[in-house]
Each structure stands twice: as C-alpha cells, then as structure tokens.
Image (cartoon, rainbow, N blue to C red):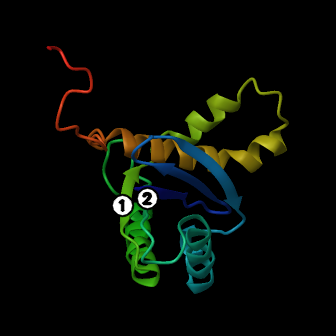
Amino acid sequence: MRYVCLDLGGKRTGVAVGDSITRVVTPVEVLEAPGGSQMGSEYLARLAGALREHLGDPPSPGEVVLGLPLNMDGSEGPGATAVRQFGARLAAATGRVVHFQDERLTSVDADWSMARSGLTHGQKKKRRDALAAAAILRDFLAGMSPPSPTRQPSQPEYPTGP
C-alpha cells in the first residue's frame, strides 16, 4: 500500500510518500500552505491536489497519514483536535482513508538530520517540514505488522531429498 504523509504546519506543510511493502519513505515537497487556524476550503483543495499528484484519483490504492500534534505527556490539546477535524474533512473530500500518527519531536529529528549538512538556515527551513513528514511516516510504517510474503510456494524452492 502506498501512503502520503502530511505534516500540517502553521506556514508550511511537509509531504512525504512511502510504501508499506518496502518501508521506503521519501520526503517529496514542502507546500507553502498554512495550516493551523487557517485550514479552510482553499487549504483543503490544495492538499487534495497534492494527494492526487502522489496517489492518483480513487479508486487507485493509497492512504493518508496526518501528523498528530500531541502534548509531550501524550494528551491531545486543541491542535490535535483541529487536525482530527481536518482529517475527517480531507477523508470526505478525497475518498481516502486517513490515519493519524504522533508527530512529537519529528521536527527535532529533521533538524538533527540536517545539522552537519552544510546547508544554510534558509535551505534547511525549506526542507525541514518534508523531512518531518518522512519521520512521521517512518514511525507509522514501523508500527505496522510486517508485510506478508507475496509468494508462498507449494513446494520448497530447494528440494531436500531425492
């Protein structure tokens, strides 16, 4: 199954894609699309367009993962409530299943991964949200059960007897 992860932010939204079979995750873009209290219909349409770009139109398979901003103690505050409400709107608008994944410390993870990259502050800022989305998606995929084998032979591949 293919997944698109969105890290909704106050000014930018990070986008990453990944696959549940290979467990490979790639940060793909940062949309200059503000979230937060500005998660209106224009923002919804912009993100729905990004989902179409990376997943295709339904009924093509693919699901969405949204970063859920939990408090450090694991409780949900107003930000998490807003993301859950937006997730319901996004699911209704796109016909996609939407999952939520704890996003605590993913921006710190993104900063750490760029710490000695030689990038300027501005260059890091342009990549941070996509890297955070990739970290959220990696955590989500890591929490899934292992993929089932795609091939189950009826006989051993290497016979053991005559």
* Badge 1 density bin: few <14, some 14–19, many ≥20, Cα 10 Å: some
Against 129, residue 56 (above or below) is: below
Secondary structure beneath label 2: strand
Q: Which mark is residue 83?
A: none
Q: Relative to the observer, which residue lies in front, 1 or 50?
A: 1
Instruction: Report the residue marked by disc 1.
Output: 99
* Badge 2 density bin: few <14, some 14–19, many ≥20, Cα 10 Å: many
Name the kind of residue labelled 2 in the image: Val
Instruction: Report the residue marked by disc 2.
Output: 65
In the image, is 154 to the left or to the right of 116? left
Contact, mark 2 vs mark 1 (Cβ under 8 Å)? yes
Give the image quarter of residue 78.
Answer: bottom left
Q: Percent position (x, y) of residue 15?
A: 60, 57
Secondary structure beneath label 1: strand
Give the image quarter of residue 76.
Answer: bottom left
Give the image quarter of residue 134.
Answer: top right
Q: Percent position (x, y) of residue 125?
A: 75, 46
Q: Relative to the observer, which residue lies in front, 6 or 147?
A: 147
Q: Residue at x 43, y 64 (%)?
A: 62
